[in-house]
Every structure is written in C-alpha cells, then in structure tokens.
Image (cartoon, rainbow, N blue to C red):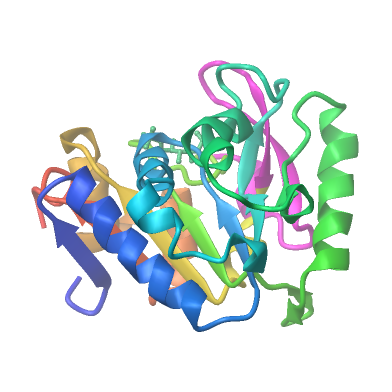
Amino acid sequence: MNSANIKIFSDPIELSENLTETFIKYIDKRSSVNIALAGGSTPKIFYSTLSQPKYQHKIDWSKIYLYWGDERCVPPVHKESNYRMVKEALLDHINIPAENIHRIKGEVDSYREKNYYSRLLLTNLPQKNGMPVFDWIFLGLGDDGHTASLFPDSGNLKVDDQLCVVAEHPETGQQRISFTIPLLANADRISFLVTNKKKAQIIEKILRCRKVSRQYPASLLFDKRPDAEWWLDQDAATYL
Ligand code: 6PG
C-alpha cells in the first residue's frame, strides 16, 4: 500500500479543489490534451468544481479534447447519461469548442457505436504501444470494484484486442459502452476518484490486499498501472 500513489483529503470538496488546482497546472504546461471522463458522483463533484468561475477562467478549454471512458446506452438527455451529467456539471458553464467534445452516442445501436468510437479514438489520438493514448483518464470505483463499465466476472475483463466493449450492468441489465483494460492501462496518467464510507471496504481490499483483490476490475487495471493515482476522501480511506 505504501508504494501506491494515494492522496487523502478531508472531504469531497477538498479533494475536488486540490484536483482542480492540479488540473489547471497540468493543462497550463501543455498545448493540447486528450482526457477521458468518468461517470459517478465523485467525478461529478470534480466537474462542478472545475466549472466554478474562480477555476474555469484559468483554463484554456480550446486545448482540451474530451472523451468518455464509458457511457450508458441511453439518449444524451436521459437522466442516467454520463454525457448529460458532464454537460450539466461542466460543459454548460465553460467555453469549450463543440468540436472538442466527443460523447459516446448512447442512443444508437451499442455494437455499432462501440466500433465507431473505437475508430474515432484510432483517428483522433496519438498512439503508444500500438494503441490510442490518452493524456489523462479519470475513473470512479464502484463498491463491487467495477471501474468505467467493466464489472466483476465479465468476459470483458479478458478482452485484449479491442479498445471498447459493450457491457451489461450486472443488476439492471442496462447496456453500456466501456473502454477496455488495455486502453485504460495505456493512458499516460490515470486517476481514481473515490469518496464516501460505502467505498471504504473495497478501497481497503484493492489497496491493502493486492493479492486477493484480483477479481476486481479496478485491481486488474491497478496491477498493470501501479502508478495510478488514488484520490480519496477520509471516509473512503477509513481502513487504510
Ligand atoms: C458509471 C461510471 C462508474 C462510476 C462508479 C462510481 O458510468 O457509472 O463510469 O464507473 O464511476 O460506479 O460511481 P459513484 O461515484 O457514483 O459511486
């Protein structure tokens, strides 16, 4: 656990403000960045913080190209759409060129969109290890250890020859489109954003019991990228 890149904050707001300051400095040093966003409540707080006037005006949004690490197969106006969540928390408040925003189209055929989005990544992004490389990927963590829409016991966890897959939520059956482990692991920088006491147990398992936690999708990614960052609040870090 000691070697893991863990940052613990008193609460989600302090986490988000620190991450926002880090993001601002990161963007300032670069001419253009390809970012993949996550759904979820903790990422949402980060996006809302980013959109605050005191922060957003420090960022040249024209440098930033936004993608989604996963999306629910619903229309973009649906309450469960990750795109809609980011639009309401961030996009509606910042001056980012529309052409910089590359949402996954949850409203079309999932397999067709999975293939289309994979081709888009191959076209738009630079490559590393023969695969598109994101500058920075933000991820949440489910209390079952899922990340993006890669769920435990899914055959998608073994997919190593595709960039994106069609997934199915294990409880609701809702179709999702998700990056695969190889694509996620190829990013230059990976940050897990995890808050809330309900995540404390899974965080302990993934960060303390590396040997036994292999069945968790987030652990599979962490094994490939032990440099991944864990941005936690004290509640999520209760057992560390
Ligand atoms: C999604 C997300 C998913 C999310 C985790 C954590 O589409 O739901 O990409 O991976 O990040 O489920 O979500 P919470 O922070 O809301 O628990």
For the point 15% across and 46% down, which residue is it? 11
Q: Magenta residues? A: 153-178
Quadrant the C terminus occupies: bottom left
**Image quadrant assignment for residue 174:** top right
In the rendered image, residue 150, in percent from the top left (x then y), is placed at: 56, 43
For the point 34% across and 70% down, which residue is it? 22
In the rendered image, residue 160, in percent from the top left (x then y), is placed at: 72, 62
- Visible residue check, residue 230: no
- Magenta-colored stretch includes residue 156: yes
Q: Nearer the viewer, residue 85 or 4?
A: 85
**Image quadrant assignment for residue 118:** bottom right
Image quarter where ligand 1 lies: top left
- Visible residue check, residue 150: yes
- Magenta-colored stretch includes residue 67: no
| In this view, 143 is above or below 2 | above
For the point 12% across and 43% down, which residue is it? 235
Q: Is residue 231 left or right of residue 181?
A: left
**Image quadrant assignment for residue 17:** bottom left
For the point 20% across and 70% down, which residue is it? 1
In the rendered image, residue 67, in percent from the top left (x then y), is placed at: 67, 52
Q: Is residue 180 left or right of residue 27?
A: right
Q: Nearer the viewer, residue 60 or 181?
A: 60
In the rendered image, residue 234, in percent from the top left (x then y), is placed at: 11, 49
Q: Is residue 28 left or right of residue 134?
A: left
Q: Is residue 192 left or right of residue 233?
A: right
How many dots with numbers? 0
| In this view, 43 is above or below 58 | above
